[in-house]
């Protein structure tokens, strides 16, 4: 019996005690299209990082288990070694050079020099950088790769100005042009493609598989998985749920297995009465956030509501808050409490009574080299002029006594584990840094609070405290709270309604007690009628 092309055997991986993969076993055969699916944090990226020998794996203690290629145990220590084993990968982020032609992008680092005396001499004297290239041969190779993908475009066309859908095909063409390619990993390859382009890509995948090339197809589009894949593997929370033939399953079962649990909602919390007043109205919002682009979303959030925004990674859910808060360029109409919010003006939005806890606490949310106290009051001091005292009628200085007093109270209220309010924020654990972000936002006394990924990277105790606090702010102060999270279970445990974003657009709004199938299909861009 012919061995599998690729075998993952009992693969486990942890980062600083956080288990992200546990005893994962997957077999992938020659010429097989194998779909890999799972929610955010399921372990897909970590598994692919192991396959490609990425430094993030080897610099953090490696992994447990083994990997076999053609039946031989193999340890891949770099992406270059992965290529030597015939493994290619097309990432979601394009790595192309706009000023080069299609051929030049496909053949970069694998250029073909002319067979000439001049090249032999200059090669010996100056190295390959002085050799002339055989563009005829390179164009022929590029043409063959483009034809395999069904791309009717001249290979010598300059990349700059081409539609974005073409970029995805050119990335794939570059990989299949490599000699000895055995396995191709496609990470959400249809995410930027129009429907007709996606159909063409699926045909090209079948063509590649018929030539014996195995494909790992990472996608959230369940209809595409059903249409093109031979096998599907579902990961959840770092563990293998199931590997089975696609012919033995359907989109509804895959969605249910991907989400994997029915969330139990506290009835008292889920039936609380809310105002009919609209606190936030969003119309045709577009946000140019790389990797989280928003493509025209309409939303209405009621006063005092805890409103959730969920969806898979890279689908636009994070772009909504970032766009409204002016972190990324946005256009559309947004009003808060009946007044228009100016877009692309963070100061004006904060001044209007909107608070924000960013998902990027280190890059946006915190001053890591400053004290906890300074972090807690900094934004309020800048926006509202709080915690300042005047000297000589015009000189404003920080009121250190009140700053420290307020910080100590917030440390107590949020149970921030620290030596004192003067400790540098950068020396806190991730969970305590998150609490400082929340403390900073609450110090501004917002009437509406955006909280993005509030529990990412923190322990279960800190998660409960933050979620309980958000619930309390809504119940006791009537604060409107909009939570963006990759943790669907947490959204269901606290939110009154949950909007699902898919491909930059609103897929729908569900109650927290909706079934896993409803959530899974909506996150995958499908509805129950498909």
Image (cartoon, rainbow, N blue to C red):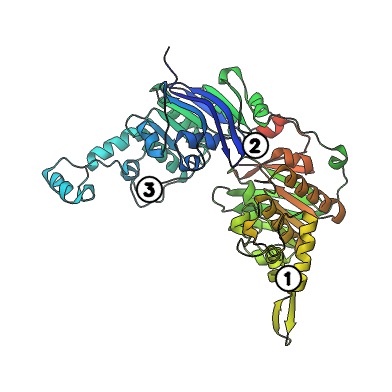
Q: Which mark is residue 523?
A: 2
Give the quadrant of residue 339: bottom right
Could you tell me how far apart the alpha carbons at marks 2 and 3 are, in whole angstroms? Answer: 33 Å
Is residue 526 rendered to the left or right of residue 33? right
Element on which disc 2 rests: helix
* Residue 337 in view here: no
Front tag of 1 and 2: 1
Front tag of 1 and 3: 1
> Where residue 514 sits in the image (x, y, percent)?
76, 34
Tell me: residue 290, above or below residue 201.
below
- Quarter that holds the N terminus: top left
Mark 3 neighbour class, 10 Å CA radius: few under 14, some 14 to 19, many 20 or more: many
Q: Which mark is residue 159?
A: 3
Element on which disc 3 rests: loop
> Where residue 435 sits in the image (x, y, percent)?
72, 54
The tag earlier along the polypeptide, 1 or 3, is 3
Could you tell me how far apart the alpha carbons at marks 1 and 3 are, in whole angstroms? Answer: 48 Å
Is residue 375 rendered to the left or right of residue 211? right
The tag earlier along the polypeptide, 1 or 2, is 1
Give the quadrant of residue 148: top left
């Amino acid at each position: 019996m012919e061995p599998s092309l690729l075998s993952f055997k009992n693969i486990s991986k942890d980062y600083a005690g956080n288990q992200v993969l546990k005893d994962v076993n997957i077999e992938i055969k020659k010429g097989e299209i194998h779909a890999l699916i799972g929610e955010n944090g399921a372990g897909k990226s970590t598994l692919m990082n192991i396959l490609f020998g990425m430094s993030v794996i080897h610099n953090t203690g490696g992994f447990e288990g083994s990997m076999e290629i053609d039946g031989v145990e193999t340890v891949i220590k770099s992406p270059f070694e992965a290529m030597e084993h015939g493994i290619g990968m097309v990432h979601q982020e394009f790595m192309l050079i706009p000023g080069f032609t299609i051929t030049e992008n496909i053949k970069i680092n694998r250029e073909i020099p002319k067979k000439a005396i001049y090249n032999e001499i200059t090669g010996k004297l100056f190295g390959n950088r002085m050799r002339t290239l055989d563009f005829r041969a390179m164009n022929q190779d590029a043409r063959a790769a483009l034809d395999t993908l069904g791309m009717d475009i001249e290979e010598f066309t300059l990349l700059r100005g081409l539609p974005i859908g073409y970029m995805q095909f050119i990335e794939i063409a570059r990989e299949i042009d490599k000699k000895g390619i055995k396995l191709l990993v496609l990470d959400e390859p249809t995410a930027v493609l129009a429907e007709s382009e996606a159909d063409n890509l699926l045909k090209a995948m079948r063509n590649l598989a018929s030539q014996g090339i195995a494909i790992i197809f990472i996608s959230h589009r369940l209809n595409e998985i059903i249409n093109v894949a031979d096998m599907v593997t579902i990961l959840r929370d770092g563990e293998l749920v199931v590997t089975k033939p696609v012919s033995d399953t359907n989109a509804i079962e895959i969605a249910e297995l991907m989400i994997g649990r029915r969330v139990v909602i506290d009835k008292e919390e889920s039936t609380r009465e809310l105002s009919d007043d609209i606190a936030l109205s969003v119309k045709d919002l577009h946000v140019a956030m790389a990797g989280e682009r928003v493509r025209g979303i309409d939303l209405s959030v009621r006063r005092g509501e805890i409103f959730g925004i969920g969806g898979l990674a890279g689908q636009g859910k994070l772009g909504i808050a970032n766009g409204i808060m002016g972190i990324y360029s946005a256009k559309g109409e947004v009003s808060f409490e009946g007044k228009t919010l100016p877009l692309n003006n963070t100061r004006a939005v904060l001044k209007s009574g909107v608070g924000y806890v960013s998902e990027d606490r280190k890059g946006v949310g915190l001053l890591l080299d400053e004290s906890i106290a300074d972090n807690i009051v900094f934004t309020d001091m800048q926006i509202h002029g709080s915690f300042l005292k005047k000297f000589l009628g015009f000189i404003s200085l920080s009121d250190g006594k009140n700053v420290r007093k307020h910080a100590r109270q917030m440390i107590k209220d949020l149970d921030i584990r620290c030596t004192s309010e003067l400790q540098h924020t950068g020396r806190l654990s991730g969970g305590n840094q998150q609490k400082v972000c929340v403390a900073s936002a609450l110090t501004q006394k917002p009437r509406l609070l955006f909280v993005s990924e509030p529990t990412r990277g923190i322990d279960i105790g800190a998660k409960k405290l933050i979620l309980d606090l958000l619930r309390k702010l809504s119940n006791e102060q009537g604060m409107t709270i909009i939570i963006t999270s990759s943790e669907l279970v947490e959204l269901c445990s606290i939110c009154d309604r949950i909007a699902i974003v898919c491909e930059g657009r609103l897929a729908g709004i569900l109650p927290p007690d909706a079934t896993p199938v409803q959530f899974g299909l909506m996150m995958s861009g499908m509805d129950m009628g498909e």
